[in-house]
Image (spheres, rainbow, N blue to C red):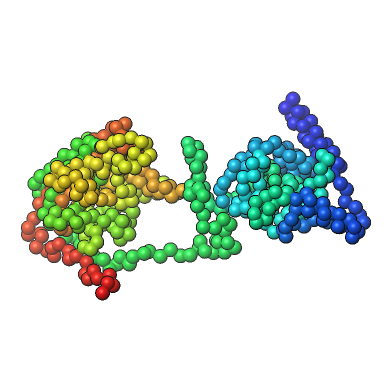
């Protein structure tokens, strides 16, 4: 029954299409007389066509793209076939293109010819996609005297598919309104977008440096990437020295950081500290300062530029301007094996700044005081700083044990369940005297959420170790600050 019904509907569609085409004015085989040309031009003007991008469909002019009616029906489907080949009209306010505001090009659904730029699209209130101009040479016109009116029909120049009509009640500067059936169009966005089913908003919606890619777009994209900083000239990491230090180090202190809280700790230059997962998977946010000069603090973005988006053994945590020197060197990392996963994720990132109550209030409208930013502020207040100085001193963090990256399609920052397990640790050698603060993130292992009390959280353990003085004799001491004089060209 289904097959028979489909065949009947198909034959009806074809017969209706042929009937509709028979109602259209037949092209005369005779050349146009001067009088007829003047009459047609007058008809074009009064029916709305004024502009340079129009060409009247010639007598006996055949389309560049020709197919049988059966083939058109197969390719287009019934609805688009009735519009493009049967000169039908879709009901107003029914097609998504009427509401589409993305940047790109609208093409003929029949042959793919580019017809309209999104920059020429506007909301006419008619219920159909409307454009104030067309791409030159893409559209041809024909006088339509159906329904007791004289209108100017617009068709695709290549396949002669019916698009709609054009009127002279549009906006400046053309004063034209191309009233087009959405079923007659296809849309190609100029920017790759990823749509969220929850919000319906596109990636970088409404922002584009070019509505239509230039002819050499692909050539421009083939430019060879160049690493920004020549890091071969950085002070070398003496891995043998750090291994000797590790072999003889002795634990002298420890600090247990409670879940959804933070604690501070101090080290002398030449000591080591280790952050360990002790009860369950948990990520932490680490801040470092020069113990003797709190203005010198960890500089996450410069560390990212000099090393990578995620840190591991042999990488260093660099300090802020004007000092810019290694504050700590990572001497061991039990999660070094993780590397990069198929999602582009890695562990111990210097991408994310830290969860904070300000962003939480903007996104959720809630007051929450156990974000990592607030936790770190409380730790410094506990150390003896005033709350204003403490908040001004908290900075972008090293996200210890956190597994993060950027999505392949939209390049948005993501998090996923941390691979850390009890017993895993990351270890640092203090290149300068350090004041540290560590927050046990309210997101737990960051597999689902953060900045709330919904996730199971665990404590983190900070252990302090002394180095063997005999081994430290081979150490050159704290690195010098940057040699830049700091004049900035100011006389």
State whether residue 463 appears in this view.
Answer: no
Q: Quadrant of the C terminus?
A: bottom left
- Image location of residue 98, percent across then percent down: 62, 42
Q: Quadrant of the N terminus?
A: top right
State whether residue 325 appears in this view.
Answer: yes
Q: Is residue 270 left or right of residue 366?
A: left
- Image location of residue 82, percent across then percent down: 75, 39
Q: Is residue 406 left or right of residue 46?
A: left
**Image height of 333 relative to 362, above or below:** below
Q: Quadrant of residue 32?
A: bottom right
**Image height of 415 relative to 327, above or below:** above
> In front: 393, or 402?
393
Number of labels in the image equals 0
- Image location of residue 273, percent across then percent down: 16, 49
Residue at far bottom of view: 491
- Image location of residue 148, percent across then percent down: 83, 40
**Residue drawn where x is 37% and y is 36% of the image:** 364
Residue at far left of view: 469
Q: Is residue 282 left or right of residue 203?
A: left
Residue at far top of view: 1
**Residue drawn where x is 82% and y is 56% of the image:** 41
Q: Is residue 477 left or right of residue 27?
A: left
**Residue drawn where x is 25% and y is 37% of the image:** 370
**Residue drawn where x is 20% and y is 47% of the image:** 388
């Amino acid at each position: 029954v289904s097959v028979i019904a489909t065949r009947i509907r198909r034959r009806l569609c074809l017969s209706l299409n042929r009937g509709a085409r028979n109602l259209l004015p037949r092209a005369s085989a005779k050349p146009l007389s001067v009088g007829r040309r003047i009459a047609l031009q007058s008809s074009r003007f009064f029916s709305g066509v004024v502009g340079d991008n129009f060409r009247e469909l010639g007598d006996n002019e055949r389309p560049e793209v020709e197919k049988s009616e059966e083939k058109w029906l197969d390719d287009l489907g019934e609805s688009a076939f009735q519009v493009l080949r049967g000169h039908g009209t879709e009901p107003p306010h029914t097609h998504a293109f009427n509401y589409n505001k993305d940047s790109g090009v609208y093409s003929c659904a029949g042959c793919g010819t580019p017809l309209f730029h999104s920059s020429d699209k506007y909301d006419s209130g008619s219920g159909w996609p409307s454009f104030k101009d067309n791409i030159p040479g893409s559209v041809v016109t024909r006088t339509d005297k159906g329904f007791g009116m004289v209108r100017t029909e617009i068709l695709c120049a290549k396949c002669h598919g019916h698009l709609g009509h054009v009127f002279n009640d549009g906006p400046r500067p053309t004063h034209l309104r191309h009233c087009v059936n959405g079923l007659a169009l296809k849309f190609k966005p100029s920017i790759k977008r990823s749509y969220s089913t929850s919000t319906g908003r596109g990636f970088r919606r409404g922002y584009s440096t070019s509505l239509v890619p230039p002819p050499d777009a692909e050539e421009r994209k083939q430019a060879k990437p160049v690493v920004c900083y020549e890091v071969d000239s950085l002070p070398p990491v003496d891995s043998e020295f750090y291994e000797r230090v590790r072999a003889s180090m002795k634990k002298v202190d420890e600090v247990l950081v409670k879940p959804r809280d933070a604690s501070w700790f101090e080290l002398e230059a030449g000591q080591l500290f280790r952050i360990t997962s002790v009860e369950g998977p948990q990520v932490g946010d680490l801040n470092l300062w020069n113990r003797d000069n709190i203005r010198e603090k960890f500089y996450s973005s410069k560390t990212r530029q000099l090393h990578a988006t995620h840190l591991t053994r042999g990488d260093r945590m660099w300090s802020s301007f004007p000092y810019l020197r290694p504050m700590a060197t990572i001497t061991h990392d039990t999660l070094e094996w993780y590397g990069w996963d198929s999602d582009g994720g890695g562990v111990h990132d210097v991408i994310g700044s830290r969860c904070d109550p300000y962003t939480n209030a903007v996104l959720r409208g809630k007051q929450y005081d156990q974000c990592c930013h607030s936790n770190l502020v409380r730790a410094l207040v506990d150390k003896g700083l005033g709350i204003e100085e403490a908040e001004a001193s908290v900075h972008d963090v090293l996200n210890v044990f956190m597994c993060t990256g950027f999505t392949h399609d939209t390049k948005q920052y993501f998090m996923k369940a941390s691979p850390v397990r009890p017993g895993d640790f990351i270890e640092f050698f203090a290149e300068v005297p350090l004041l540290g603060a560590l927050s046990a993130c309210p997101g737990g292992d960051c597999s689902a959420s953060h900045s709330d009390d919904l996730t199971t959280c665990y404590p983190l353990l900070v252990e302090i170790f002394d180095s063997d003085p005999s081994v430290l004799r081979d150490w050159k001491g704290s690195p010098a600050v940057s040699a830049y004089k700091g004049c900035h060209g100011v006389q």
